[in-house]
Image (cartoon, coloured by chain):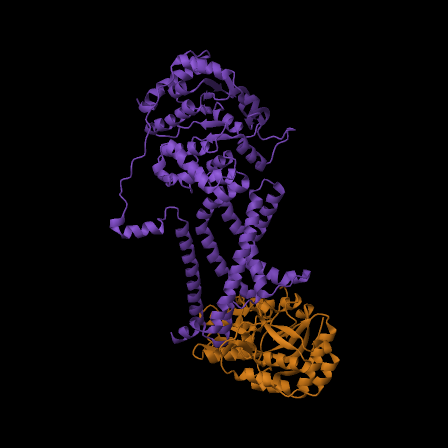
Chain colours: A purple, B orange
Amino acid sequence: MELFFHYLRMPYLLQGVEFTLEVTGFGLGGGLILGLALASMQLSHNRLLSAFARGYTVIFRGTPLILQLVFVYDALPHIGIKLIPTIAAGVALALNEAPFIAEILRSGVLGVDRGQIAAGQALGMTPVVLMHRIIAPQAIRTMVPALGNEAISALKNSSLASVISVQELTLRSTQLASSTFDFFSIFFASGLVYLVLTGAFSAVQLIIEVLLDLDRPSPRDRLMRLLPWRQPALSRPAPVFITGQDAAPAAPMGSRAARSAGLADGVATVEVRDLFKRYGNHVVLDGLNFTVRIGEVVALLGPSGSGKSTLLRCINRLETWESGAVRVGGRNLGFSDDGKPLTARAVAHERASVGVGMVFQQFNLFSHLTAQENVAGPLRWVHGMSEAMADRRARELLERVGLSARAHALPRHLSGGQQQRVAIARALAPNPTVLLLDEPTSALDPELVNEVLEVIRRLAVEDGLTMIISTHQLRFAAEVADRVLFLSGGRVIEEGLAHDVLTRPRHPQTARFLRVMGADQVTAIPA
Amino acid sequence: MLINVKNSGHPARPRMKISGWLSATFGIFCLAASVVPHAASAQGAPKLPEACTQLQAKYPSLKGKTLIDAVNPHTPGYEALDPNDPSKYIGFDIDLAETLGACLGFKLTYQPVAFAALLPTLQSGQANIVISDIYATQERAKAADFIKYSKVYDGVLVVKDNPKKITGIDTSMCGATAAENTGYVEVPLIQNLESACKAAGKPIPVIQLYDNNANCIQAILAGRADTYVNDVNTVDQAVKAYPDKLGKAVAVTLPYSVGIAVPKGDVAFRTAILEALTALQKEGIETAMLNKWSLGAGSMEPAALLTE
């Protein structure tokens, strides 16, 4: 025991820790940089880069670190690269860590909900902004435990540097044991030192996890919790829910007809011509044609798989297509004037400047941001608005959708209906010229459907916003839409004034669909 | 790495060391330590022969240089950490290296590597010289040039009282388990017993490979191995550390010499070392070092070149 404490305090061994940490630090830092490069290469769409990264990963993940150490130390000098042992060990460890770290980074990035990425793209975010504001902050949170693991494993792996004469803790322990024959006291002492080091790494990991925890109460809140008399009242004012009953009644049919007549002369905002798209052999859009004019509300109806969502995604170029054209605000979205496809970055700028807002079936709120940040963030990052202005705009919009009280709540603390209302506020924030809504109520519990429909209804009636809505809510379509397009098999099989199509369908498929869905409506819309 | 380097110690052979120390490479350590007589003697040491002055004039390029000496510092007596000041290496080989350096005007730093990595380290240029109780064999001479400086005597380390009755590298080892270090010359010698054991109708010996003396000794203490054949001095040190558990069965003479390894084909450098070593031997300095480390003055061998 006495010997154990003697070795535990021995400066010679403790100084070995410096080398251990140096090699580990070099290995982790270099591994992170290389790993970032490898992950970017693999995630890129460049086949050459991704094949290179794959090849690197196969080699360096598939061979023992000890061979890599010897290679860097003893083989590189033959081509004129002679590194001192500590650096050679750091380089070998970095080369070895890189593929593991790259896979952690890659899984973090791939783990971010694709819907949020689509939402970011629809808001006009460039790939860089998307990575910086949406993907990275979420990916980093999920990667911390795995990176903590990797750091600890790198620390332990640094002991292999003893084979290339790095004076780290393990090498010093074995040498000391050889000269003193006190094997066990020495190895227990160095084992304890390793435990202390890995324990410190674990502690850092836990601290980072706590700091990144979105649900962590602020220091002020924690203080408040200790001062019961300062606690805020638990009952907050209930958010204002707008119910169907309170809504303005649908415009009488007479004025609807007049409105429709007026719109018919308006300027075309969205024009879709001969749009053809397929996934493999399956044709999704089969030569689709239609026009939406300024101020018009168009409902897309049709059975599942009829191409409604794909069509909406084509309109703001979240999807590519085989042939045909989509013009929004007079621009060929996604193509330059001479018809060449634009880069992802240029498409993003175009989306932002043309102004196509999109609301998704699954809401796709950025889950790491509060309701207010979901609205205000894109205004700052895409439209360069000042923080104060963006926040003011966000508060106005949240108030309009009845969610002022939940402005600072995270999406996961909101109901589905509330989330969809935030998503609508987010889509409206940059004042889009056209708003695309992809089955905005399908993912909601029946009792939450109406609060969302009411918000949309007001946008149509009060703001005169141009909207294309794919929906199964026939009553809502009848109340809000000027025109209805009925899609089936990727084609428009019936088109006309909403009231006409919904009450007197001409195509038998439309009639059958309306019969089935109509029965549904009775239960889907609360009385 | 393919080369099998080996070292082996043998008994009374001169290898002494002076204070080694390694950290110089990194310059970081300033450890504690205490008085290390060896260290002191190493540095202060022997009066150099007259010849050294002429040699320095003859080989001016070595003067003032700092050379890297690759060592496998797990062999107390030849090269190991100074238990009193782990910032230093001590032993016969270290003393010899320092004295050669003093004679030719260069300084040394020590690079600790696995035994099997000694010659690869020299070949890759990560070290300039290897003085680490390595046997100069024809095979190894393919990787480096050697300047021989002592004879080889091995000892056979066994469990106390030699329950397996091992009498050397012969058929008494059939069926026994021998611990050896990767790259040691004893490995092929033991492997070669295979036909003799088979002829005698006995099982062949099993070899466990480790990477330093300490692990080989532990293998016997833990009951994993029956014997460990290495230079006599190493074996004696182990018996001294564990008198109740270990014993020396016998000493064996191997047909090898211990040598200083230098980069292949560097004629000027190897000649300088050869001439300096010869000068030290003439003055009785090597013999004095052998005595200082209790390695047996009789094992001294006149300096000679081995090249392939």
The vertical placement of B198 against A58, above or below, is: below
User: Quarter of the image holding residue B78?
Assistant: bottom right
Between residues A128 and A279, which one lies in front from this camera angle? A128
Between residues A426 and B100, which one lies in front from this camera angle? A426
> Residue B23: image x %, image y %?
55, 73
Query: Could you tell me which residue is drawn at 51 percent across and 38 percent down?
Result: A382
User: Quarter of the image holding residue A250?
Assistant: top left
Between residues A180 and B138, which one lies in front from this camera angle? A180
Is residue A495 at all visible to an observer of this figure? no
- Position of the N terminus of chain B, as image quadrant, is bottom right
Query: Could you tell me which residue is drawn at 42 percent across and 60 percent down?
Result: A200
> Residue A399: image x %, image y %?
37, 34
Is residue A505 at all visible to an observer of this figure? yes
The vertical placement of A152 against A478, above or below, is: below
Q: Report whether B214 appears left or right of A367.
A: right
The vertical placement of A418 against A297, above or below, is: below
- Position of the C terminus of chain B, as image quadrant, is bottom right
> Residue A325: image x %, image y %?
58, 24
Q: How many numbered circles does the render carry?
A: 0
> Residue B164: image x %, image y %?
48, 73
User: Quarter of the image holding residue A89?
Assistant: bottom right
Query: Could you tell me which residue is drawn at 49 percent across and 70 percent down?
Result: A15
* Residue farthest to the left, as pictured: A229
